[in-house]
């Protein structure tokens, strides 16, 4: 019997996918910034955010019994990533922060 993904999961999966794409783009751009050395915490948090979003998508896609717990962790990391990105005024950081906040909101609903 195939695993079906509920609409609630699907909205969260979509938000996680948008977030990880924004984070990947932001990470690449941050590494090329002249002040990249000063962005170490932001870059590390971007990597954490990318990884947790991928893992969350995988868990939700397979309807894992641990998906909701993982979404709670994902929300926490996405919020931290947004906070770091908001410190920088580049367009890529601001867009990433917005995607992270949206993802965190969806993940919080999932963790409910």
Image (tube, rainbow, N blue to C red):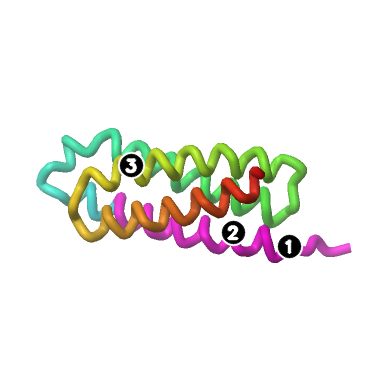
**Tag 1's secondary structure?**
loop
**Residue at horizontal 64%, vertical 44%?**
111
User: Quick one: quadrant of the N terminus?
Assistant: bottom right
| Residue 47 rendering spot, x and y as whole percentages | 39, 42
Q: Judge whether 75 appears above or below 3 on screen.
A: above
Where residue 55 sits: x, y (%)?
Answer: 58, 46
Q: Which residue is mark 1?
A: 5
Q: Which of 30/105 is in front?
A: 105
Q: Residues within 10 Å of mark 1 (few under 14, many from 20)?
A: some
Graded by Cα atoms within 10 Å as few (under 14), some (14 to 19) or many (20 or more), the crowding at tag 2 reads many
Question: Marks 2 and 1: in contact by CB < 8 Å?
Answer: yes
SS for callout 3: helix
Choose between 6 and 4: the one closer to the eye: 6
Which of the two marks, 1 or 3, is nearer to us in this view?
Answer: 3
| Marks 1 and 3, the one that precedes in the sequence | 1
Instruction: Determine which quarter of the picture holds residue 14.
Output: bottom right
Q: Earlier in the sequence, mark 2 or mark 3?
A: 2
* Quarter of the view holding residue 68: top right
Residue tagged 3: 83
Q: Which residues are magenta?
A: 1-27
Q: Residue furthest right?
A: 1
Above or below for 7 versus 70:
below
């Amino acid at each position: 019997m195939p695993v079906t993904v509920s609409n609630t999961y699907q909205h969260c999966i979509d938000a996680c996918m948008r977030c990880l794409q924004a984070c990947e783009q932001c990470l690449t751009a941050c590494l090329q910034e002249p002040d990249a050395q000063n962005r170490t915490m932001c870059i590390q948090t971007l990597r954490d955010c990318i990884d947790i979003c991928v893992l969350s998508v995988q868990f939700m896609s397979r309807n894992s019994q641990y998906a909701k717990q993982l979404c709670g962790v994902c929300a926490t990391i996405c919020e931290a990533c947004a906070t770091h990105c908001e410190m920088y005024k580049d367009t890529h950081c601001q867009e990433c922060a917005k995607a992270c906040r949206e993802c965190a909101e969806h993940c919080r609903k999932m963790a409910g």
